[in-house]
Image: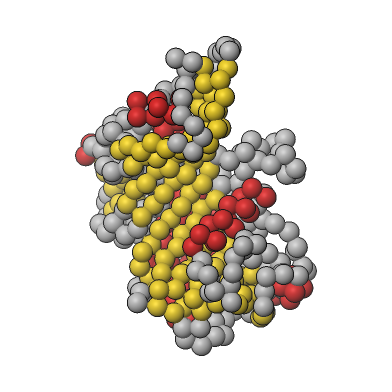
Amino acid sequence: MANTLARILFELDWHSDRAHHCEQYFAPKVNFWRDLIPSPMLPLETAAPGAQVEFKLPEGDSVPLRTSSAVVKVRPHQFDRDLVPCQTLEPQVGRFYPITVLKEVPGLFHGDYRPCRCVKIEEAWLTFDTNHPLAGREVTVRATLESRESRAGDNGGRCFDWVEEASNKGPGMQALDAHITNDFGAPRNFQRGDEGDDGAFYAVPRVLTHVDSVTCAQIRDLSARLLPEGAELLDLMSSSESHLSDTSILREVVGLGMNSEELAQNPRLTQYLVHDLNQTPTLPFTDQRFDAVTCHLSIEYLNKPYAVVAEVARVLRPGGLFLVTFSHRWFAPKAIKLWGELHDFERMALVLDYLEQSSAFEGLETLSLRGLERPDDDRYAFQLEHADPLFAVWGRVKG
């Protein structure tokens, strides 16, 4: 076998009880000579760029098999509430925690940061599921060859299981399952570090991008794919950038944000309004006013998100799209408490819950995108290898 180095996009496609999910993972240096390559992918070694293979993830391969013995019951005192410095953890149904939070459990070890999910809370017992979040689910893997180069020799190095890389460290944690009631709506979850006036906090314009240019481009591409041509769009929590492709043909783009100077600098807005959703979650628009609503890189700041999402459903026409995107950067003082406590993938579950609880949306989907190379001109280019991850949740108003 030749020593071939390839850039491959892995896509993991799966369903939970209430949504369809896709995990995209870019592997920049897949070594066909050294790495663990599933047999269905071997044709990519000699294929032309653009070639794609698709296969089912074998049970127990990359994702361990689901077992009933991995569901454990512990006494309340065995949950380490002091695991995180300067923070008191409290178990909540539906939430994920690192396994190391469970003390004195046979077969579980301190320092194990794989996720486990709290599935039941009783007076004398807490029940946790320590299975892999994707265990027991049917996962379809698509591998697309983006580029390939042959190398004369090899100087050693690590051996990677790229499918395992793509399926670990989060995928599965965004699922809302019918047999688990998430306790996301507890009032404490929506407290913020800075409860001061939002108008004062956002009074100074911040004309900046919250993610790197590669991830910005991915948001624009996703918006272009989902937004219908000629749509009337509401850009919720808008600023100087609406993350719209230059080729997007929209009839109207209305921006609703917190700073008039930022909004005035946004070239895509045909109209804008200054409106504080945390003070007044009601949207100042008539019923069925828009074809689509987007909320990019801002959903974590809403302290009444369920009310706002219900309003989004009201102002959307039947079949209208609501698209939410976020990454791993935010203004910490103004983000809700729960946001900072959740895993990246678990935040998609929270946003799904916002849409689910409104009872107005169908066709719920999530997308994660990781592994793209950070651009050379980014200020963190010499500190971080990968571009900012992208997470997206969307659904459409029931007809």
Q: Residue 367: image x %, image y %?
A: 46, 52
> Quarter-wise, where is residue 193 in the image?
bottom right
- Outermost residue on the bottom side: it is 286
Q: Residue 290: image x %, image y %?
A: 51, 79
Q: How many marks?
A: 0
Residue at horizontal 54 percent and vertical 82 percent from the top: 283
Q: Residue 238: image x %, image y %?
A: 64, 70
- Outermost residue on the left side: it is 68
Residue at horizontal 55 percent and vertical 61 percent from the top: 224
Q: 179 or 191: nearer the eye?
A: 179
Position of 84 relative to 326 (above/below)? above
Q: 190 or 213: nearer the eye?
A: 213
Residue at horizontal 62 percent and vertical 38 percent from the top: 373
- Outermost residue on the front side: it is 48
- Quadrant (top left, top right, bottom left, bottom right) of the N terminus: top left
> Quarter-wise, where is residue 325 in the image?
bottom right
Q: Residue 307: image x %, image y %?
A: 47, 76
From the viewer's perspective, tell me whether residue 339 is left or right of residue 120.
right
Residue at horizontal 51 percent and vertical 53 percent from the top: 391
Q: 203 or 58: nearer the eye?
A: 58
Colouring chosen for the image of the structure: secondary structure
From the viewer's perspective, tell me whether residue 343 is left or right of residue 249.
left
> Quarter-wise, where is residue 43 in the image?
top left
Residue 239 makes an appearance in the image:
yes
Residue 102 makes an appearance in the image:
no
- Quadrant (top left, top right, bottom left, bottom right) of the C terminus: bottom left
